[in-house]
Image (cartoon, grey):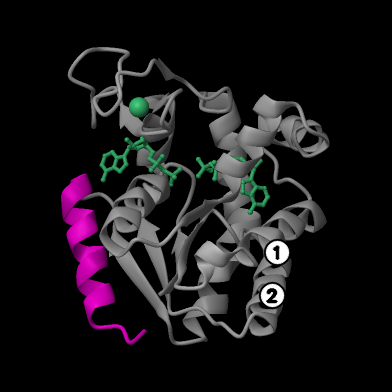
């Protein structure tokens, strides 16, 4: 299954992709996670990405497309994958189509998690991530049993530098201008489904799995 998880920042893409990884045993490919790992390692890619991320802007298409091209060519993608946070521009979507064609693949389904703009800032500002395993929590909507400590691995939680109100406003306007047009792009391809992301986390997963159960591989 070649899946694309779409939705504005904070919609729940990463949370849901992690659940589908467990269910379908296919890798999650999150460009945001890849950029954050590069920033942490201090690589050239990390240096190029950091300024854009801190400003709530997109990393340039040629950089982003390059890392996805490399990632999709790896062996673990042969049985499928879940793209999370890529593509975010029409140029990236066109490039993805080409990359997949070169690999003899195509997208099975585009899953767009819909959450109204007014909920997204609260979701992002309350987001907390495990330093150790990357699990995502929320101070109000998905709290850990012990404050500041990951339920899964006991790791320490942190808050992303770009998960503040000002940067989130910028990210939402970038989403409207550059990423929302992809909805029409994929609607035209007949593989697009919208899921109500305002529901509880497990209900959203249920809806996603139900869509996927009726989709042909
Ligand atoms: P994205 O990857 O789309 O940016 P995340 O999966 O990281 O979004 O979720 C953003 C924040 O919202 C996280 O703190 C997460 O725990 C929380 N969250 C995710 N799904 C839901 C939901 N259905 N209801 C309430 N909060 C949610
Ligand atoms: P969220 O889902 O909360 O928006 P991500 O982790 O997906 O967060 O992305 C964080 C940041 O990484 C983005 O604001 C952007 O700077 C950069 N980024 C991630 N994916 C892409 C992409 N496909 N194209 C350009 N920049 C990206
Ligand atoms: Zn953890």
Q: Quadrant of residue 216?
A: bottom left
- Callout 1: 10 Å neighbours few (<14), some, many (20+)? some
Query: What residue is at 18 percent from the left and 46 percent from the top?
Result: 200
Q: Nearer the viewer, residue 130 or 175?
A: 130
The rendered magenta stretch, by its main secondary structure, is classed as: helix
Query: What residue is at 35 percent from the left and 39 percent from the top?
Result: 119
Helix, strand or loop under label 1: helix
In the image, residue 160 lies in the stretch drawn in magenta: no
Q: Position of residue 79 (x, y in %)?
A: 45, 73
- The reply to whether callout 1 and callout 2 are in contact (CB within 8 Å) is yes
Query: What residue is at 36 percent from the left and 58 percent from the top?
Result: 113
Q: Is residue 149 above or below residue 4?
A: above
Kindly identify which numbered label has been placed on residue 69: 1
Q: Is residue 217 above or below residue 178?
A: below
Q: Position of residue 213 (x, y in %)?
A: 22, 77
Query: What residue is at 52 percent from the left and 66 percent from the top?
Result: 77
Q: Position of residue 25 (x, y in %)?
A: 34, 61
Compute the Cα span from label 1 to label 2.
6 Å
Helix, strand or loop under label 2: helix
Answer with left or right where residue 77 lies relative to residue 212.
right
In the image, residue 215 lies in the stretch drawn in magenta: yes
Mark 2 lies within 8 Å of ligand 2 (Cβ measured): no
Mark 1 lies within 8 Å of ligand 2 (Cβ measured): no
Q: Residue lying furthest front in this view?
A: 75
Give the mark nearer the N terminus: 1 vs 2.
1
Quadrant of picture, ligand 2: top right
User: From the image, which quarter does the C terminus lie in?
Assistant: bottom left
The residue segment tinted magenta is 200-217
Question: What residue is pinned by disc 2?
Answer: 99
Q: Is residue 214 above or below residue 181?
A: below
Kindly identify which numbered label has been placed on residue 96: none
Q: Quadrant of residue 182?
A: bottom right
């Amino acid at each position: 299954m070649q899946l694309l998880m779409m939705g504005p920042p904070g919609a729940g893409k990463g949370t849901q992709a992690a659940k589908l990884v467990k269910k379908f045993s296919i890798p999650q490919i999150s460009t945001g996670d890849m950029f954050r790992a590069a920033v942490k390692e201090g690589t050239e890619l990390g240096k190029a990405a950091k300024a854009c991320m801190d400003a709530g802007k997109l990393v340039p298409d040629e950089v982003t497309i390059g890392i996805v091209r490399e990632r999709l060519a790896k062996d673990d993608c042969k049985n499928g994958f879940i793209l999370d946070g890529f593509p975010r521009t029409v140029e990236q979507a066109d490039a993805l189509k080409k990359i997949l064609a070169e690999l003899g693949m195509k997208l099975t389904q585009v899953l767009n998690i819909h959450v109204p703009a007014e909920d997204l800032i609260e979701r992002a500002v309350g987001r907390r991530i495990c330093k150790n395993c990357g699990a995502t929590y929320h101070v109000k909507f998905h709290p850990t049993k012990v404050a500041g400590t990951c339920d899964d691995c006991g790791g320490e939680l942190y808050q992303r530098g770009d998960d503040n109100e000002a940067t989130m406003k910028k990210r939402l306007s970038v989403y409207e201008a550059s990423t929302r047009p992809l909805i029409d792009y994929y609607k035209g391809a007949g593989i697009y489904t919208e899921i109500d992301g305002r529901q509880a986390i497990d209900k959203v997963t249920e809806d996603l799995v139900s869509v996927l159960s009726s989709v042909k591989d």
